[in-house]
Image (cartoon, helix red, strand yellow):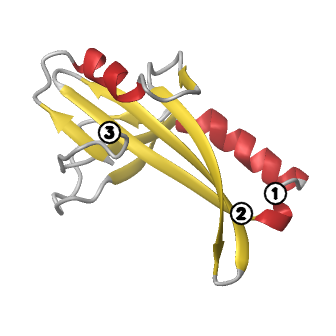
Amino acid sequence: MVTTKGVADPAERLRKLFRDHGNVETNEATGNLVRRSEKDTVEDGDKLHIYYWFVGGCVPPDMVWEAVFSYTVLTERLNNDETQSEVKLLDQLVGKARLSHLLCEPAGDFPCFSPGGGGMVMSHFATGPSPMS
């Protein structure tokens, strides 16, 4: 999770972060921008397929938040019905993440996740450059 605070126009900053990437969708319910990508890799001899979802949203009055979700499966299970159902569910859920100023334990740079109506609620205390920049 990356937070950019003190942005004069958060919506414009968010559009700039995502504009150079293809396959960006807007979640109608939250206004979040969502980009999905995939890659194959090998770890300890196991062939893996990793799905990534980059989710960006504005938190009034002056913050832009980005969260990266990932889901890893064995390549041999990539086309299983169960795997495809799980990926479809994740496609639906990650864009509904609600980015918020929730008060969690002020433990530094760790995000706080809690269930929220229609999705996950995230709060975070760190700032830094975008992983997409």
At mark 2, the secondary structure is strand
Mark in the foreground, 1 or 3: 3
- CB under 8 Å between discs 1 and 3: no
Image location of residue 127, percent across then percent down:
17, 46
- Amino acid under label 3? Ser
Image location of residue 40, percent across then percent down:
67, 59
Q: What residue did someone put label 3 on? A: 133
Q: CA distance from mark 1 to mark 2?
A: 7 Å
Near mark 2 (Cα within 10 A), the count class, few <14, some 14-19 or many ≥20, is some
Q: Quadrant of the C terminus?
A: top left
- CB under 8 Å between discs 1 and 2: yes
Q: Is tag 1's residue or tag 3's residue first in the polypeptide sequence?
A: 1
Above or below, comparing residue 7 to residue 35 in the picture: above
Q: Is tag 3's residue or tag 2's residue first in the polypeptide sequence?
A: 2
- Amino acid under label 1? Leu
**Residue drawn at x 22%, y 44% as measured from the top left:** 129
**Residue drawn at x 65%, y 37% as measured from the top left:** 91
Q: CA distance from mark 3 to mark 2?
A: 27 Å
**Residue drawn at x 33%, y 48% as measured from the top left:** 1
- CB under 8 Å between discs 3 and 2: no
Q: Is tag 1's residue or tag 2's residue first in the polypeptide sequence?
A: 2
At mark 3, the secondary structure is loop
At mark 1, the secondary structure is loop
Q: What residue did someone put label 1 on? A: 78
**Residue drawn at x 54%, y 38% as measured from the top left:** 94
Q: CA distance from mark 1 to mark 3?
A: 30 Å
- Residue 90 relative to residue 124: left or right: right
Above or below, comparing residue 45 to residue 99 in the picture: below
Judged from this view, the residue extending furthest toward the bottom is 44
Q: What residue did someone put label 2 on? A: 73
Quadrant of residue 66 within the rendered picture: top left
* Residue 118 can be seen, yes or no: no
